[in-house]
Image: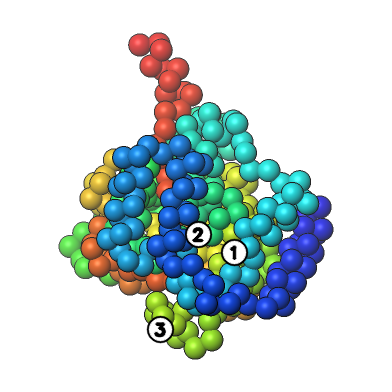
């Protein structure tokens, strides 16, 4: 079944890339694209008008957030192509069990299957990159601060690094941040010290969401870079992403998709316990980019196994107003929930 899906994925991509690119003169403006996105976002996730106004305000304050610069972005697959492909493969992303646990659509529980069940989860993660809707392009050109604010407006939060890693690797492990290595040194030095210890611990058992070895053709990594794109500029680099969920085999065992390819993702890397999003921090820690992006099948720029922690790329506090943004960088949100076990304990009190 998986081999058949891979063949179908390759066939779709080759067919679509061979088609003539859309006429730039017919492209929608960023505002028009975002207005359509807002309608989908509210309808699918059941957001209130007040929540939507907060999200619209964050987008307006940016001037860049969206699904890419419409003037130059060339998506290799349309949302309709995505829906037809998933229908042909009989793939459905609705999950009543997950929705009951997480209290929201298109979220997956985070837990360790060796000792827990999904109902024991105390956190959930978006199954797809924001806007977390199947067959919709991911939002990019978003700063880490803006990502955290959008998550908060939706009643969620930006994920801690270990949560994203657990979602990808198929098991949420306890936080392993070596905060002692971050004391009395610069953030750059702290990140490098902590990542070396972390990566050394997990490198022997490295895995990807889809399996134990890196493979091409599984995830949304077969797109192309805009000709002449070198510095990541708004006018020179198209966000040539695929619709979310269009590669259904790019899935972790916890039911989370597109953790490799499509858009890289903002995450919170705490350098002290009071910077942990999962423990209620709103000041948050430092930026980390997770995953990989839409040309990775041809340009393997860095490791992207699940628990790999990156250097201090474009590093800043998450809530810095000038935190990094670019054409292939998006995000997904997490949410703290009450586990079945915790609920049961409350009843006994």
Instruction: Specify the farthest residue to the bottom.
Output: 228
Q: CA distance from mark 1 to mark 2?
A: 8 Å
**Which numbered disc covers residue 138?**
2
Instruction: Specify the farthest residue to the front.
Output: 26
Compare marks 3 and 2 and give the one earlier in the sequence.
2
Residue at 59 percent of width and 59 percent of height:
243
Compare marks 1 and 2 and give the one earlier in the sequence.
2
> Position of 47 compared to 119: left or right?
left
Query: Is the Cβ of the residue at disc 1 closer than 8 Å to that at disc 2?
Result: no
Query: Is the Cβ of the residue at disc 3 closer than 8 Å to that at disc 2?
Result: no
Residue at 62 percent of width and 39 percent of height:
94
Q: Secondary structure at mark 2?
A: loop
**Which numbered disc covers residue 231?**
3
Q: Position of residue 205 (x, y in %)?
A: 58, 58
Does residue 50 appear in this view? yes
Q: CA distance from mark 1 to mark 3?
A: 22 Å
In this rendering, the count of numbered labels is: 3
Q: Check disc 1: other Cα within 10 Å, few if <14, some if 14-19, many if 20+.
A: many
Residue 241, above or below 165: below
Nearest to the observer: residue 86 or residue 3: 86
Residue assigned mark 1:
242
> Position of 239 compared to 347: left or right?
right
Residue at 27 percent of width and 60 percent of height:
61
Residue at 40 percent of width and 62 percent of height:
31
Q: Which of label 1 and label 3 is nearer to you? A: 1
Question: Where is residue 222, by image quadrant?
Answer: bottom right
> Position of 332 compared to 56: left or right?
right
> Position of 308 compared to 210: left or right?
left
Question: Where is residue 58, by image quadrant?
Answer: bottom left
Q: Position of residue 162 (x, y in %)?
A: 43, 51
**The C terminus - image quarter:** top left
Instruction: Specify the farthest residue to the left.
Output: 184
């Amino acid at each position: 079944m998986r081999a058949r899906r891979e063949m179908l994925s390759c066939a779709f991509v080759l067919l679509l890339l061979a088609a003539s690119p859309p006429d730039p003169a017919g492209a929608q403006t960023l505002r028009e694209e975002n207005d359509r996105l807002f309608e989908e976002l509210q309808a699918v996730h059941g957001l209130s008008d007040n929540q939507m106004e907060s999200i619209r305000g964050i987008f307006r304050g940016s001037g860049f957030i969206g699904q890419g610069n419409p003037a130059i972005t060339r998506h290799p697959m349309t949302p309709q192509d995505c829906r037809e492909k998933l229908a042909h493969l009989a793939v459905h992303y609705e999950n009543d069990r997950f929705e009951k646990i997480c209290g929201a659509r298109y979220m997956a529980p985070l837990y360790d299957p060796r000792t827990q069940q999904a109902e024991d989860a105390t956190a959930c993660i978006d199954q797809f990159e924001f806007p977390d809707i199947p067959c919709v392009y991911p939002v990019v050109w978003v700063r880490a601060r803006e990502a955290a604010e959008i998550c908060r407006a939706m009643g969620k939060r930006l994920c801690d690094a270990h949560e994203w890693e657990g979602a990808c690797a198929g098991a949420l492990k306890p936080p392993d941040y070596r905060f002692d290595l971050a004391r009395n040194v610069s953030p750059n030095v702290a990140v490098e010290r902590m990542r070396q210890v972390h990566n050394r611990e997990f490198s022997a058992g490295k895995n990807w969401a889809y399996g134990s070895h890196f493979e091409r053709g599984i995830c949304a990594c077969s797109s192309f870079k805009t000709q002449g794109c070198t510095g990541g500029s708004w006018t020179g680099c198209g966000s040539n992403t695929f619709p979310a969920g269009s590669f259904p085999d790019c899935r972790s065992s916890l039911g989370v998709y597109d953790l490799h390819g499509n858009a890289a993702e903002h995450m919170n890397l705490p350098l002290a316990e009071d910077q942990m999003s999962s423990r209620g921090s709103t000041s948050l820690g430092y930026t980390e980019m997770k995953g990989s992006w839409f040309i990775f099948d041809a340009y393997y720029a860095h490791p992207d196994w699940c628990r790999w922690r990156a250097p201090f790329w474009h590093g800043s506090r998450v809530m810095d107003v000038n935190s990094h943004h670019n054409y292939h960088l998006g995000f997904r949100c997490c949410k703290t929930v009450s586990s079945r076990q915790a609920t049961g304990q409350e009843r006994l009190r």
